[in-house]
Amino acid sequence: MNSIYCWHMLVFLLVGAAGCSVESRDEQYAKMVTDEYGQLTRARSSPNAELQDELDRVEDEGGTPVQLDSPPSDGGSNTAVALLKLFSPKSLERADKASRELIPEDRFTFSPMVLEKMIRLRQKYEQAWLNSRAAYDLPHCNFGLMHKAGFFADTSFIDVVCVCGRLEAFQAAECLSNNDLAGAVKSLGYMFRGAESLGNERHVICRIEAARLRRIALAVAEAIVLHPNLDVESITHVYAMVAAQLDHWPQDCRAWVGDRALGLHTYEAIRGGDLIWLLTDQEMQRLVEETNLSVFEAAALRGIDADEIFYLRTMRDVIAACEQPFYRRREVFVRTRLRLNELEDTPEYPVIAGRMLLGDIEQGQRIQAEDRAACEAWCLALALAAGQSPPPYQLNPLSGKPYQVELLPGQTIVAAEGKPADPWYTAIVVPWPERTQQSARRDKARVQ
């Protein structure tokens, strides 16, 4: 799993260095997104029966690049179409950079000067922000991601969704500073809608960015519940939003079915002589240090059928393992690492799978599990603080250990193991609104 942003930047740099015209870049792009790659024409022409069997399995599951494509529906009711009209490319680039710089790294706290910058940036993109809300109020969302284009597909919608999410965070910050909890809760709702729209895509980068946006949303939720004017309506609404995220949670395998299609497209591009367009800047630098591009390409092509078989069988195990929570998938990751280590210095080493495609899968799935665990832990804490029945979340999908729930006078504490840098994994503290505390005192008096 490699960053799409690195791919796009590399393509730009390589084309620019070659001095290509706009027309030439368009021709190169047309070559890269040809249906021939998406339809796996070159792999299908291989006489290797094992490879054909693996490709048949993917096709039977509806998992080839072409099969995963779904053209966007009617623009009048499609959130995605409306979102993509919000920014020009240059404006989106500027808004993305400026908004990233203002988002706090962990808890949603900041100085008065940073708050003023947030407010001014949101005001600068006021019309886009308002139009994004109208877009999210439309009945459905389909970004029409073109899987047959592989790493060269247009994924600018990811930046649009993330920018809109940050603008909502800035609006929430302004509302909280003005004691407007209802306004902050409304912004939180739109942030969650953005995360959900990205998370539903069959694409790992979309899924990762959904997790990052949801992390910001949970930090905003924390700022709301820690506000001194917290009321039961606000905490009930926040609880309902987090619960809805979990109710609509996409299956983990969706992203990895899409990632496998991306891998299939990668093999086709390499078979077609387009390896240079696939390498990230880090991979290019590593190749320069270790060998050279022509040696790597020749080694990759020499064993490409066996390499692709190894990849598809590994991905079959990875996708099947998604039926289990993350802490039960580790055997698959360990087995893959051991097998790659065994083959490292042999002619059978799968260069493409080992060096380009499989390296970051465990980390990607860990991010999915962290995202889920954070929402479950928050849902538990919010439900109890809002006086609701606790949801049925008991084991942390990341660690397999129980959430530790502690009810104290006037607050709920939920602890879950995770990375120390993630505040909600160490301890989530949610105060009880006054009305909930009064209700709890009445219940306790009745019991006595």
Image (tube, grey):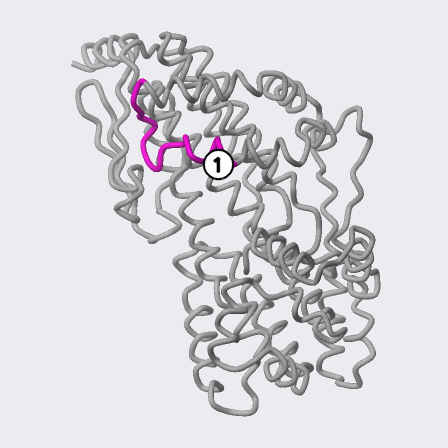
- Is residue 379 at all visible to an observer of this figure? no
Note whether 53 is above or below 223 in the view shown. below
Q: Nearer the viewer, residue 109 or 419?
A: 109
Q: Is residue 235 left or right of residue 253?
A: left
Residue 171 versus residue 403 in the image, above or below: above
Q: Position of residue 349 (x, y in %)?
A: 54, 85
Q: Position of residue 413 (x, y in %)?
A: 24, 31
Q: In the depicted view, which residue is nearer to us: 231 or 194?
A: 194
Q: Quadrant of the N terminus?
A: bottom right
Q: Is residue 175 left or right of residue 439?
A: right
Q: Nearer the viewer, residue 289 or 372?
A: 289
Residue carrying label 1: 213
The magenta segment:
97-112
Q: Is residue 251 left or right of residue 56?
A: left
Q: Is residue 356 visible to us here? A: yes
* Image location of residue 178, percent across then percent down: 37, 7
Residue 35 belongs to the span the image colors magenta: no
Q: Residue at x 72, y 54 (%)?
A: 147
Q: Secondary structure at mark 1?
A: helix
Residue at the image point whose x is 52% and y is 75% from the top: 287
The quadrant where residue 133 appears: top right
What amino acid is labelled 1 in the image? Answer: Leu
Q: Residue at x 82, y 58 (%)?
A: 27
On screen, residue 52 above or below 62: below
| Total residue callouts | 1
The C terminus: image quadrant: top left
In percent of width and height, residue 244 lies at 52, 29
Other-residue count near label 1 (Cα within 10 Å), few / some / many at <14 / 14–19 / ≥20: many
Quick check: 444 above or below 273?
above
